[in-house]
Image (cartoon, rainbow, N blue to C red):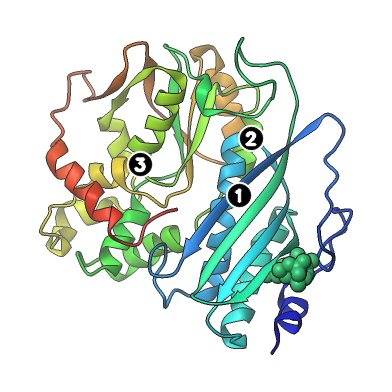
């Protein structure tokens, strides 16, 4: 199968919303009146971001999901995407499920495949998504004139929230790398979180005008909240007694299943929640006056959200227990955990 047949067969689809889709030198998009284009790119490299033997259907889903997650973090509505694909061989048995996983998620978000590039080479998937957000007055003086959710809008006193669950993707990765062993049912669920994340697009849209800042969690809560703190020039306090409840695989860490815990570096639930990547949930901030509005946004988008802390004027990130006392978190082992991650299959 040649390059053009491959494109025609797997990646050429009707694009009713785009002015022009696949087949010309450029695709053409028409954002709505008063709308701005939100653009983001993420690349997935075999052996680096996913295992070579990953189910192609899930890989197709994930390649687009990680990009939609960036639109979600901005509160942007998906419009279209391009797909740059480097493939070792034109293998139909791989391409078919890959395209199915990719295009099913695209359809679910009415995000049209409008172009791309296809070349022979090591497996590498690069997607660029285009979304739209309304133009608008800046949140505060000195900020960009947009209604997009930005990393730089958090203010002292704001609450900090996280959507969904955190840490399970990391747990699955540890298991796939052979560091730990998970019971079959927990492994299936955690693996789904790693390989088929849910981009929180509806929540992001519902948080426009409500959240002061947002980011998606691709590298771990501490790291991605850290981006918000840095861009906003603020600090934060996180309640670890709440954070630790965010991992869905609770059973692995408690009692009966402790026997499966064979990780020599003593992986803890809190480490998975705070440092685990690949969850693609949102971390966002909102003024306490917006609590009812945040709940309404969560309900409207059918996405659970949990308040995990607050923004401080004082820079830095403080971890506390339920009583507000500092948690002496073993950062040495935590850092070790982070540096392990860099050498292995990780989020983009
Ligand atoms: P060019 O020579 O201008 O780079 P190509 O010959 O690479 O164009 O691609 C032909 C058309 O197919 C273009 O419209 C391009 O956007 C589209 N295309 C190429 N690869 C893909 C792909 N993997 N998915 C979707 N569209 C693609
Ligand atoms: Mg080309």
Q: What element carries label 3?
A: helix
Q: Is mark 1 on a helix, strand or loop?
A: helix
- Sequence order check, earlier mark of 3 and 1: 1
Q: Which residue is pictured at 43% across the width and 58% down the height?
A: 193
Residue 186 position, x and y percent, is 32, 63
> What is the distance, in whole Å, between disc 3 and disc 2 at their CAs?
23 Å
Q: Residue 246 carries which label?
A: 3
Residue 257 numbered mark, or none = none
Residue positioned 48% across, 43% down in the render: 281
Describe residue 196's horizontal placement relative to residue 17 as left or right. left
What is the x, y in percent for residue 229? Answer: 40, 24
**Which residue is disc 2 drawn over?**
75
Q: How far apart in space, not on screen, are marks 1 and 2 (Cα)?
A: 10 Å
Q: Which of 13 and 298 is in front in this view?
A: 13
Local crowd at mark 2 within 10 Å, few (<14), some, or many (≥20)? many
Judged left or right of residue 23, residue 75 is: left
Q: How far apart are marks 3 and 1 (CA)?
A: 22 Å
> Is residue 288 visible from the viewing direction of this image?
yes
Q: Ligand 2 quadrant? A: bottom right
* Residue lying at 80% horizontally and 69% vertically, measured from the top left: 13
- Name the residue that disc number 1 marks: 68
Callout 2: SS? loop
Q: Indicate the quadrant where residue 224 lies.
A: top left
Vertically, is 159 above or below 59?
Answer: above
């Amino acid at each position: 199968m040649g390059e053009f047949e491959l494109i025609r067969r797997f990646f050429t689809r009707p694009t009713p919303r785009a002015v022009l889709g696949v087949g010309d030198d450029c695709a053409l998009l028409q954002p709505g009146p008063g709308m701005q284009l939100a653009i983001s790119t993420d690349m997935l490299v075999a052996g680096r971001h996913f295992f070579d033997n990953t189910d192609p259907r899930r890989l197709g889903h994930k390649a687009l999901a990680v990009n939609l997650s960036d639109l979600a973090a901005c509160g942007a509505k998906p419009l279209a995407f391009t797909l740059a694909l480097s493939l070792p061989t034109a293998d139909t048995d791989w391409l078919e499920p890959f395209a199915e996983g990719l295009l099913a998620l695209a359809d679910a978000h009415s995000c049209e495949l409008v172009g791309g590039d296809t070349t022979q080479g090591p497996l590498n998937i690069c997607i660029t998504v285009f979304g739209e957000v309304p133009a608008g007055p800046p949140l505060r003086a000195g900020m960009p004139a947009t209604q997009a959710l930005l990393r730089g809008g958090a203010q002292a006193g704001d609450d900090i929230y996280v959507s969904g669950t955190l840490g399970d993707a990391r747990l699955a990765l540890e298991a796939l790398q052979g560091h730990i062993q998970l019971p079959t049912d927990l492994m299936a669920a955690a693996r789904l979180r790693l390989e088929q994340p849910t981009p929180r697009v509806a929540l992001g849209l519902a948080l426009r005008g409500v959240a002061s800042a947002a980011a998606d969690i691709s590298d771990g809560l501490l790291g991605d909240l850290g981006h918000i703190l840095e861009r906003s020039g603020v600090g934060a306090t996180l309640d670890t007694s709440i954070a630790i409840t965010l991992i869905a695989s609770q059973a692995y860490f408690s009692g009966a299943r402790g026997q499966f815990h064979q990780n020599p570096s003593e992986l803890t639930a809190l480490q998975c929640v705070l440092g685990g990547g690949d969850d693609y949930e949102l971390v966002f901030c909102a003024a306490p006056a917006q609590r009812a509005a945040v709940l309404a946004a969560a309900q409207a988008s059918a996405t659970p959200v949990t308040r995990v802390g607050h923004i401080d004027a004082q820079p830095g990130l403080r971890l506390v227990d339920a009583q507000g006392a500092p948690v002496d978190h073993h950062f040495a082992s935590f850092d070790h955990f982070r540096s392990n991650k860099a050498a292995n299959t990780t989020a983009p």
